[in-house]
Amino acid sequence: MHEHHAYGPSETGTVVLDLGGDTGALIIYTGRDLHGREIEISRDDERRVHSAVRERRVRDGSFHSAVYPDLPSGIYTVWWDERTPAGTISVHGGEIAEFAWPSSGFGAAG
């Protein structure tokens, strides 16, 4: 994760995902405490990509998440920080993968 941004909430229908073939997407669900933070992901040894956590308003309320559209199929590492993985997730073409951000305290030095 890096940087903090001041993005407003996204409303219902403002995120478009183009799924199919070898292309999928990933949603990382977080708490509101991560609003504006960027979370990095990477596949194999490829360059990391990031997305900012934003409030997502839906008909029944709201939640916070980072969305990664248009991802090639594969196993992705979700990064807690520059050196520490928070976990891995498999993305499949035509599907949306979902990852729940670990609770606070993960990755703390001890």
Image (cartoon, rainbow, N blue to C red):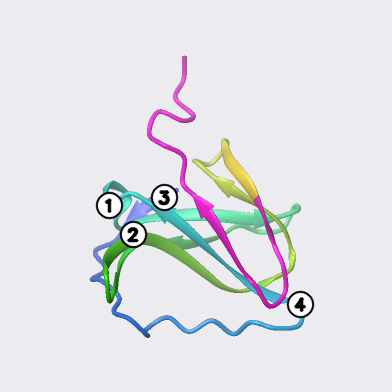
* Mark 3 vs 1: CB contact within 8 A: no
Gap in angstroms between the C-alphas marked 2 and 1 = 6 Å
Quickly name the residue at label 2.
64
**Residue 108 shown in magenta:** yes
Reply above or below: 49 against 105. Answer: below
> Residue 1 at x, y = what percent?
45, 48
Gap between marks 2 and 4, in whole Å?
27 Å
Type of the residue with mark 3: His
Tell me if residue 41 comes above or below residue 103 in the rendering.
below
Which numbered disc flags the more N-terminal residue, 1 or 4? 4
Indicate the secondary structure of the residue bearing disc 1.
Answer: helix
| Label 4 element class | loop
Residue name at image x 46 percent, y 30 percent: 106
Magenta stretch, residue numbers: 89-110
Do we see residue 53 in this rendering? no
Q: Nearer the viewer, residue 57 or 40?
A: 57
Circle 1 sits on which residue? 32
Number of residues whose C-alpha sits closer than 10 Å to that of mark 1, classed few (under 14), some (14–19) or many (20 or more): some
Residue at mark 3: 2
Rendered image quadrant of residue 71: bottom right
Which numbered disc, 3 or 1, marks the residue closer to the eye?
1
